[in-house]
Image (cartoon, rainbow, N blue to C red):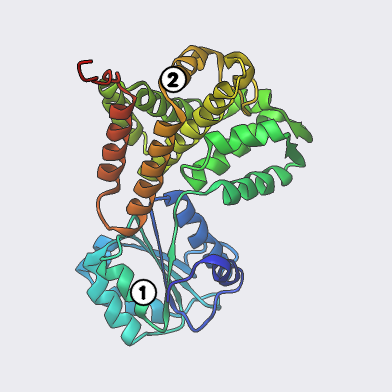
Amino acid sequence: MKVSGAKLNAFLGSPDPGFQCVLIYGPDSGLVRERADTLSRKIVDDLSDPFRVVELTGATLRSDPARLSDEAAAISFTGGRRVVRIRDAGDVLTKPLKAFIDNPAGDALVLVQSGELGPRSSLRRLFEQADTAAAIACYGDDARSLSSVIRETLKRHDLTASPEALAYLNENLGADRALTRNELEKLALFKGRSGKITVEDAQACIGDTMTASLEDVAYAAADGDVAGLDRSLARAHAEGLQPVSLIRANMRHFQRLHLVRALVEDGRRLDQAMSTLRPPVIFRLAGSFKRQVSRWDCGRISRVLALLTEAELNCKTTGLPAEAICGRVLHETAKLGGPQRPRQHGNR
């Protein structure tokens, strides 16, 4: 069964005991781990308890398929239900996992963790179609869910964020749930006391390397700098930034360009139009942003936003390599942002 939407929150809060096996997969590895931990804690208070929690790798299960049934049927010395976590799973485990789902042993909760699985993945289809197994997808946070994560994490430290700071955090976090929470914990430590996070606090503390990489990709694409885009993409992938996060960063950048360009076309001065952005454009990038506003008109920006929206959907639904989809759409963007050929007019 596929678990998503409102059903997901209910399932994470109180998992149905009728589902002994749960597949948790997706490009957001931090969110995969977080949801696996959440479900594990519904069974076991201490995740480091060696008698009640066992971790297997995909390679271990592949070489010894019977190990899963043995672990699921084992009885804890300290009593209580056990959790079996399988890391680094893939389609090669479809056969042994199907055998277990068809003939389960014991009462342990079996959590299968995996990276991105396309719609044609045999492992994903197995869990989505089974009556006694569940599949949970983990993609990068959207604006709404990210805002909830930010507020919830800061609230634990008696902190709130100003609207400008919240906008900045939404702009620069969300690529990976674990990284997002780590950055917010760092911000809370930086603040050092209860109160309100300002945009200056957030800019001083949050994700310098990650933010710079996202900005480098977006600015290179909008500048029409293909060589710079290739370098920035290679660095971003090496740092572990996910393709969907890169696409979303470019969407945010072009939405900001669209807003400013529309205001300029409506008669505002460029500096005045840029002053409406929250968070504001940082000083070192202000010159580039101004040039991009002059280069791009609203029509071409709208076209890019449509291409990026389609690319994100394709990353999630087609099963094609997400990095390839991301690279292609950003190169299309850079091509649209390159020097524009003058229109050819006939002889008069």
Closer to the chain start, of discs 2 and 1, is 1
In-front residue for pair 207/53: 207
**Total marks in image:** 2
Q: Where is residue 283 in the image (x, y as percent from the top left)?
A: 55, 13
Residue appearing at x 21%, y 66% in the figure: 92
Q: Quick one: which residue is furthest to the right in this view?
A: 195
Residue 287 vs residue 89: left or right?
Answer: right
Q: In which quarter of the image is the C terminus?
A: top left
Query: As displayed, is residue 60 above or below residue 278?
Result: below
Tell me, yes or no, whether the two marked residues, 2 and 1, touch with CB atoms within 8 Å: no
Give the SS element for disc 2.
Answer: helix
Residue 208 vs residue 188: left or right?
Answer: left
Q: Position of residue 119 (x, y in %)?
A: 30, 64
In-front residue for pair 139/74: 139
- Which residue is disc 2 drawn over? 292
Q: Where is residue 84 in the image (x, y as percent from the top left)?
A: 42, 70
Rounded to the nearest whole Å, what is the CA distance between mark 2 and mark 1? Answer: 46 Å
| Amino acid beneath label 1 | Phe
The answer to whether residue 258 is seen in the rendering is yes
Give the SS element for disc 1.
Answer: helix
Q: Bin the neighbour count of mark 2 within 10 Å (Cα to Cα): few under 14, some 14-19, many 20 and up.
A: some
Q: Bin the neighbour count of mark 1 within 10 Å (Cα to Cα): few under 14, some 14-19, many 20 and up.
A: many
Residue appearing at x 59%, y 66% in the figure: 9
Q: In which quarter of the image is the N terminus?
A: bottom left
Q: Quick one: which residue is furthest to the bottom in this view?
A: 103
Give the quarter of the image for residue 198.
top right
In-front residue for pair 107/273: 273
- Which residue is disc 1 drawn over? 127
